[in-house]
Image (tube, coloured by chain):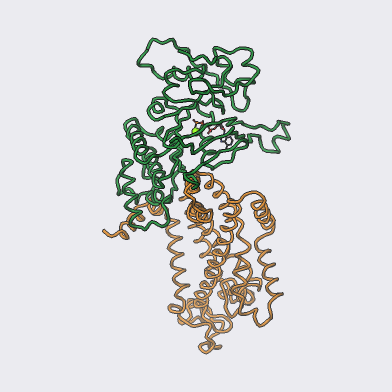
Amino acid sequence: MVAVIVSARDLGRSFDASAPLIQRLLTRAPRLTVRAVDGVSFDVTEGTTFAIVGESGCGKSTVTRLVAGLDTPTDGEVQRLGRMGQPLRTQMVFQDPVGSLNPRWRVGRSIAEPMPLSMDAAARFARVSELLETVGLVAADVAKFPHEFSGGQRQRIAIARALAAEADLLLLDEPTSALDVSVQAQVLNLLKDLQERLGLTYLFISHNLAVVRFMADRLAIMYLGRLVEEGPAERLFQAPAHPYTRQLLDTVPDVANPRRNREPLAIDIPSPLNLPPGCTFHPRCPLATDLCRRVVPELRSRPDGTRIACHAVTDEVVS
Amino acid sequence: MTPGSSYLRRMLDSDLIWQFRQAPAAMLAAAVLVLMMICAVAAPLIAPHTPFDPGTLNLMDSRLPPAWVDGGSATYLLGTDEQGRDVLSTIFYGMRISLAVGVAAVLLSVTIGVTLGLIAGWFGGWIDAVIMRMGDVQLSFPTIMIAFFIDGIAKAVMPPDLREMTRFSVVILAIGLADWVQFARTVRAATMIEKNKDYTAAARLSQVSSLKIVFAHILPNTLGPVIILATLGLGVAILTEAILSFLGLGMPPTQPSLGALIRVGNDLLLSGEWWISMFPGLALVLLVLSVNIFGDWLRNALNPRLK
Ligand SMILES: Nc1ncnc2c1ncn2[C@@H]1O[C@H](COP(=O)(O)OP(=O)(O)OP(=O)(O)O)[C@@H](O)[C@H]1O
Ligand SMILES: [Mg+2]
């Protein structure tokens, strides 16, 4: 059974980035808006991992916060479809491990926060200890304060808290970027394992393609607030079609085919404050045509089950 | 080892205590403060006389100078006032009232300020604007004027026989209401920072109610600066009370604070009985000075940016 539990429909989120009113009046500067997220649509299927990849500042965290309901979209909507009419229970692991734990709470209390109020103290304590061990810490850590842990350890505490609620959907915003490689592997294995055992659904954000390859069932590539390509992860890794996806995949070492022809990724990333007209990727795109400089490409479905936003790529499946 | 003792040890080992040991002025101020508080709290037990029990007063002993001056008596170390009350004992009792009024007034300011600050910071928008503009308006009047004003209103609305009885509460109210703004500003700023932190977002995802988020998460994270401000505010409150009393608007002569004692003695200053106002005055200076020195040290110790 394939059940969609989260559906983003044409999501948009603009931020006001204007200078303060007085300064704006003095310098006659216009209002500025950042389109952090623009026209993003995707479905997340129950029990799978949907990954979003993109450069820093492309809007990944903003999408996650919109999906979590922590922020309201300026356009479009997020449909959150819980099981059998129940509200969808969501937990999140935040990108920054410093702000994600209350500095004045012992970590045991933080981890127990999402647990149902009906649970008694002994059961809570047992569960917290179990969770701490699950994420590779020790039960004695319950009584410590966040400042007694490293960034990576705090991230694991945040993961323990997210797991405590047995939520339907886990939003993981770069959950392993603060961890060293061995711990990272441990946490990723843990997440995979839990997904299989509990049927969890993940929205997984990362800029590490190796990590994404390990985790993702479906993959979306994001560029300056828009999805440029989306589809089954295996398919995208094997046959990336969008020029940006191709460049992105080229930045990971290709062990199987080291002599593949590589184009360097241009360095000048346009500012989200001042997006280029047409396809936002055209200044960096080797295939850019006149059309690309004028018209924004829509995300369209292709026969192989992927979606792409590119004028230059035709629907014939690339070999 | 019991958890209690390990907690105590952790506290004694802490950075704050270490810094405290490095600051002789702060240590002296704290010692003086503790001593004065003991004298104040234990006044009925340790004061050599009972100055407010008319039965024990002897008018023959009035206006005696301090013990070391000619004509002084060893029974009245710092002399007596015109009713024959022992000045040292009235100081103990006066400190008791000054401190009680000061502490109660600060607690009132803290309660009002913290509550309004949390509300303003959490809700933002027009609620924030209304509260903070109210604070701005209030700050453009001197504290003492607001205290006068509240005192005046209380006098106007209360029947005369109640006035004397409610003096204590009115003075606390007048000073407490005049000084909430600094607490509200600090807490509002901290609240606006904390409410955007991810741990608050995590709590929201766990369906924790807003009220609980504000009290369990945000409030404890705003209290550090509040404690510092409250300590410094205690000095201000004690002084404000002294000024009110000195001007005859504070505590009545039957329940004199340090300020009221100075006022009573002030009338006799020109006739040469300097000790009646001088010693309560010194006690007031010592009290406020040690509160301020300790408060300043606390602010520096707790605020890493000032180091
Ligand atoms: N609250 C905000 N106010 C103004 N601009 C914002 C706000 N939040 C995000 N932005 C802007 O929106 C854009 C996307 O930010 P976002 O945090 O979603 O990026 P990201 O993909 O998560 O980046 P990273 O990989 O560095 O975490 C950025 O240009 C950012 O400056
Ligand atoms: Mg981010």
- Visual hue assigned to chain B: orange
Would you place residue A69 above or below residue B89 in this image?
A: above
Q: Which residue lies furthest to the left in this view?
A: B1
Q: Residue at x 46, y 50 (%)?
A: B302
Chain displayed in green: A
Compared with residue A11, is residue A228 higher up or lower down, i.e. above or below?
above
Q: Name which residue lies at 50% across and 44% down.
A: B197
Is A132 left or right of A248, judged from the image as shown?
left
Image position, residue B220 (x, y; %): 48, 54
Looking at the picture, how far across and down is residue A215, in whole percent?
Answer: 39, 30
Q: Position of residue B193 (x, y in %)?
A: 54, 46
Q: Can residue A136 be seen in this view?
A: yes
Q: How many labels does the image show?
A: 0
Q: Residue at x 50, y 61 (%)?
A: B291
Q: Is A38 rendered above or below residue B92?
A: above
Q: Looking at the image, can residue B307 be seen?
A: no
Q: Relative to A70, is A207 on the left or the right?
A: left
Residue drawn at point x = 37 percent, y = 52 percent:
B14
Q: Depth check: A95 or A277 in front?
A: A277
Query: In what quadrant of the picture does the N terminus of chain B appear?
Result: bottom left
Q: Pick whichever, B285 or A48, lies toward us.
A: A48
Location of residue A293 (image quadrant): top right
